[in-house]
Image (spheres, rainbow, N blue to C red):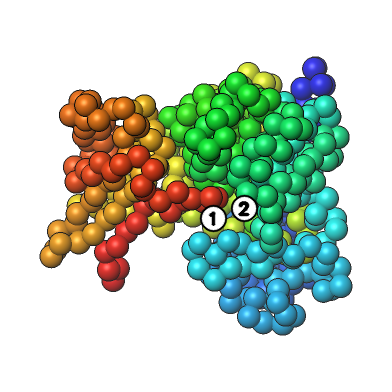
Amino acid sequence: MDVERYWNPILETLPREKRERLQLKKFHNIFKWAYEHSKFYHELYSAAGIEPGDIRTFDDIRKVPKVEKSMMRVAQGKDPYPYGDMLCVPLEKVTEYHQTSGTTGQPVYQPDTWQDWDWFAEAWAYILYAQGYRDYDRVFLPFGYNIFIAFWGAHYGAEKLGCEVIPGGVLNTEARILKMQELRATAMMATPTYVLGMADTARRKLGIDPARDLQIRRITVAGEPGGSIPATKKRMEEAWGAKVYDHIGATEIGAWSYECTHQAGLHVNEGLFLVEIEDVNTGELITAPGKRGKMVITALDRMAQPCIRFDSKDIIEWSPDECECGRTFRLIKGGVIGRADDIVKVKGVLLAPTSIEEVVRSILELSDEYEVLVTKKGDIDDITLKVELIPGQESNIDAIKAKLVDQLRIKTNLGYNLEFHEYGTLPRYDVKAKRFKDLRHRE
Ligand SMILES: [Zn+2]
């Protein structure tokens, strides 16, 4: 075995049977821990008539009640303040405070002990090592991480590998680019929106071509779906002359998946997490590739505020492929395809906003920016797509328009009102973009 290839050569190559035995044992342990140490979990499981002795097989796990974000919000209104009765440790054992971004409602607080925090960094170490980060890398993080967990985890994970880490918060975009150039940073991590935005700023305002003038060769993206949308990924890789790798994680879950250097999909870290995929309508377990469903996930080792059978609402599917890297951690295909609650029905057609991104970003005469507005005229849905032409393409507008109409029809089954805007006039976003706006009144 090529041990240099893996952060944890044993766990990452464990045969399926052994890995499942380990997951089952760990699930039993975290269930027992939560049952015995948290009032919330004790009541939830007692009401369902399940106790630790009942968890013996994977079928038993399926009977354990799921937890949703809305339940966490209710629990966090109780004592002890501010975490509520999901908490499994005395308050004084909590050393880390983070919270969710609140894009889908009231933020959820995330307490971690120092042991949990070490686990979080460890999960990130798997990610970065698999993406080729080594101790000689100088990693630039162009963000103020604030109270959000992801890039703090990345920071500590990179340090575990022995990388040199440069926190690039406070600086503005131009200053960050100049600092990366000055220090010859070799890797960076950001949201896809910001990766593209930085390249644009570098070219327009500084006359710097990131692919030619900077030494960034590895970029890890997170926080948005772009890293698993081929057209967006290609734009980022070309702009920076770097390999772009996707990662998906969440505050209340942990850093559960990563692309390796083979870029064949995202590996689920099945040493630290248990992922189940459920049919959205029937709730049945999906084990075969090729069928999409909702992810239900358990963090097997997180102790302060356990995440057990968390109903993430993320839509994913197992990949039919095995990765050439030799990891036995299964792959999911296409990242998180959407969220069960953001796949919308427009004119009676189910639409995942990511499919519009794929179309727009695959047409090279269009800029990185676009905006989608869904409105209602009387009883009829109306959908408008605003795009920008790259300067110099004005005379080709008819051909570009025809291509766009065709591709949108093929990929999304919908017709759109198309608006072409002058380059640079659609809103730009610093971190996470809000390009899809559903303005219909919801009942
Ligand atoms: Zn792989």
Taking 146 as reference, is 321 left or right?
Answer: left
Name the residue located 55 percent from the left edge and 64 percent from the top edge: 102
Where is the C terminus found, in terms of image quarters?
A: bottom left
- Looking at the picture, which amino acid does disc 2 mark? Ala
- Residue at disc 2, secondary structure: strand
Where is the N terminus found, in terms of image quarters?
A: top right
Q: Are marks 2 and 1 in contact (CB under 8 Å)?
A: yes
- Residue at disc 1, secondary structure: strand
- Looking at the picture, which amino acid does disc 1 mark? Ser
Q: CA distance from mark 2 to mark 1?
A: 9 Å
Between 406 and 212, the residue placed more toward the observer is: 212
Q: Position of residue 221 (x, y in %)?
A: 59, 39
First in sequence, mark 2 or 1: give its number.
2
Residue named by callout 2: 250
Residue 280 seen in the current view: no
Name the residue located 35 percent from the left edge and 32 percent from the top edge: 390
Taking 345 as reference, is 114 left or right?
Answer: right
Q: Position of residue 349 (x, y in %)?
A: 24, 48
Name the residue located 55 percent from the left edge and 43 percent from the top edge: 194
Name the residue located 23 percent from the left edge and 59 percent from the top edge: 375
Between 114 and 159, the residue placed more toward the observer is: 159
Residue 302, relative to residue 139: is it above or below? below
Residue 437, relative to residue 261: is it above or below? below
Q: Position of residue 164 (x, y in %)?
A: 82, 36
Q: Position of residue 259 (x, y in %)?
A: 61, 32
Q: Which mark is residue 312?
A: 1
Taking 344 as reference, is 113 left or right?
Answer: right
Q: Residues within 10 Å of mark 2 (few under 14, many from 20)?
A: some
Between 341 and 209, the residue placed more toward the observer is: 209
Ligand 1 under 8 Å from disc 1 Cβ: no
Residue 143, relative to residue 406: is it above or below? below
